[in-house]
Image (tube, helix red, strand yellow):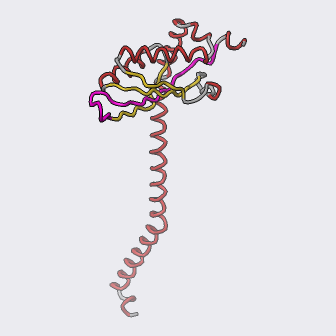
């Protein structure tokens, strides 16, 4: 005890007390604050990614609206026809573009019945279509380009290409498209 009452002992006790205090402060205050900060940073990063994704999606809306207006002026019959009347025209466009690109169609099939499709938030019916075809890579690329450049609204959801062991130049391709149909104009509402 004589050591603690000496000036060196008092200094040692004070330093020891400060170190214990610092340890307790770091352990009970700074540590939890760092955990909370890390959680907030993680949440903030997710929000930033969500905002960037939403911003990217929203940036396409003005161009899409302009394209809708252009098409409505150009194709008034499509707007006035029912979705059932539009679907054969869509299949015809797919067949024409495949022929132009020298793609051999094996099948074109809607993945849902039109009656099962509900209008999306933009008011259109989004109908998934599967296209099975045989072609070379260049022909498939040209086919996709022609579809995206057509007057119809196609969005490519997926593309699967498999080699054909019997024909190295032509590959089996499965293309998943979303086709946007007008919900129907005056004629379809009257029916």
**Is 172 placed left or right of 189 in the picture?**
left
Residue 175: in magenta span? yes
**Is 119 placed left or right of 3 in the picture?**
right
Q: Nearer the viewer, residue 158 or 140?
A: 140
Q: Position of residue 111 (x, y in %)?
A: 54, 30
Query: Furthest residue to the right?
Result: 190
Residue 171: in magenta span? yes
Q: Quadrant of residue 124?
A: top right
Quadrant, the C terminus: top right
Residue that appears at 45% across and 54% down: 38
Q: Nearer the viewer, residue 118 or 14?
A: 118
Q: Which residues are magenta?
A: 163-184
Magenta portion: prevailing SS class: strand
Task: Answer above or below: position of 59 versus 33.
Answer: above
Q: Nearer the viewer, residue 130 or 30?
A: 130
Residue that appears at 49% across and 14% down: 92
Q: Position of residue 141 (x, y in %)?
A: 33, 23
Task: Answer above or below: position of 30 versus 172.
Answer: below
């Amino acid at each position: 005890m004589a050591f603690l009452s000496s000036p060196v002992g008092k200094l040692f006790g004070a330093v020891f007390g400060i170190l214990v205090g610092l340890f307790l402060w770091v352990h009970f205050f700074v540590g939890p604050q760092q955990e909370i900060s890390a959680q907030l940073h993680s949440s903030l990063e997710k929000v930033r990614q969500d905002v960037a994704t939403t911003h990217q999606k929203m940036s396409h809306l003005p161009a899409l609206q302009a394209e809708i207006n252009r098409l409505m002026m150009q194709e008034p019959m499509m707007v006035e026809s029912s979705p059932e009347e539009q679907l054969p025209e869509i299949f015809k466009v797919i067949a024409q573009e495949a022929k132009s690109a020298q793609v051999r169609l094996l099948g074109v099939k809607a993945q849902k019945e039109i009656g099962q499709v509900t209008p999306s938030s933009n008011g259109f019916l989004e109908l998934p279509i599967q296209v099975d075809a045989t072609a070379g890579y260049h022909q498939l690329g040209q086919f996709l380009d022609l579809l995206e450049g057509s007057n119809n609204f196609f969005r490519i959801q997926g593309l699967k290409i498999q080699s054909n062991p019997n024909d190295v130049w032509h590959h089996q391709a499965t293309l998943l498209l979303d086709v946007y149909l007008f919900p129907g104009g005056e004629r379809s509402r009257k029916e």
